[in-house]
Amino acid sequence: MPGLIGKKIGMTSVFSAEGKNIPCTVIELGPCVVTQVKTLEKDGYQAIQVGFEEKNAKHTTKQLQGHFAKAGVAPMRHLAEFKNFDAEYKAGDEIKVDIFDGVDFVNVRGISKGKGFQGVVKRHHFGGVGQTTHGQKNRLRAPGSIGESSTPSRVYKGLRMAGQDGNRRVTIHNLRVIKVMPEHNVLLVRGSVPGAKGTIVVVER
């Protein structure tokens, strides 16, 4: 799917024509620069690699410096590949947020907020024991049994337990596009998207 790389600016709200208050997320989307055009003959598939946010060459590896120099563009901090663009692009072309004009819904992918080490109640929404009598002191939020002691005498793989929560790649599907503002490289979508302010996100239509 065609798309662009952007940055989550924050959340706000707008009023619809009916006077309803709509919460939405402001995303700075592009402009992105085409760093490579992949073809069926050379790469086995068709796609366009785009970059977002320039960075200093001294913070770029030699391999990537050569990659960007071949495309004739400055080193980019973030890269992503997209397919099925309506127009044809070549290395060095700039793609802006106006490709989302007339688009009603988009998918937004990003890294969710990290919440550190959490127990099973917060991480997996366990209900808890439910009582504090009959030997259940201080075990309201405990996970309970984690397997049989005799057979198979091990903990099953994938068992829901306490551990790292958040800080994972999350995709929110079918967010309604509220407004496209090409003059500011801004896209407004209804609802929230993963991550904190400043998080890098990928928007696909």
Image (tube, rainbow, N blue to C red):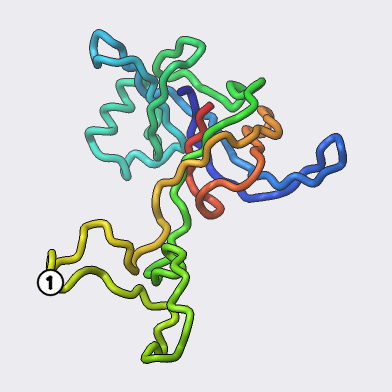
Query: Relative to the observer, which residue lies in front, 78 or 125?
Result: 125
Three-letter amino acid code at the position of disc 1:
Ser
Query: Relative to the observer, which residue lies in front, 192 or 12?
Result: 192
Q: Is residue 167 left or right of residue 148?
A: right
Q: Residue at x 36, y 19 (%)?
A: 47
Q: Is residue 150 left or right of residue 33?
A: left
Q: Position of residue 198 (x, y in %)?
A: 53, 50
Q: Position of residue 75 (x, y in %)?
A: 37, 34
Task: Establish if 119 lies above or below 69.
Answer: below
Q: Position of residue 151 (x, y in %)?
A: 13, 66
Q: Position of residue 185 (x, y in %)?
A: 62, 32
Q: Residue at x 70, y 32 (%)?
A: 179
Task: Establish if 172 lies above or below 151.
Answer: above
Element type at marker 1?
loop
Q: Which residue is mark 1?
A: 150
Q: Residue at x 41, y 20 (%)?
A: 83
Query: How many labels were placed on the picture?
Result: 1
Determine crowd level at label 1: few under 14, some 14-19, many 20+ residues with C-alpha closer than 10 A. Answer: few
Task: Establish if 72 lies above or below 63.
Answer: above
Query: Relative to the observer, which residue lies in front, 144 or 49?
Result: 144
Q: Residue at x 46, y 68 (%)?
A: 122
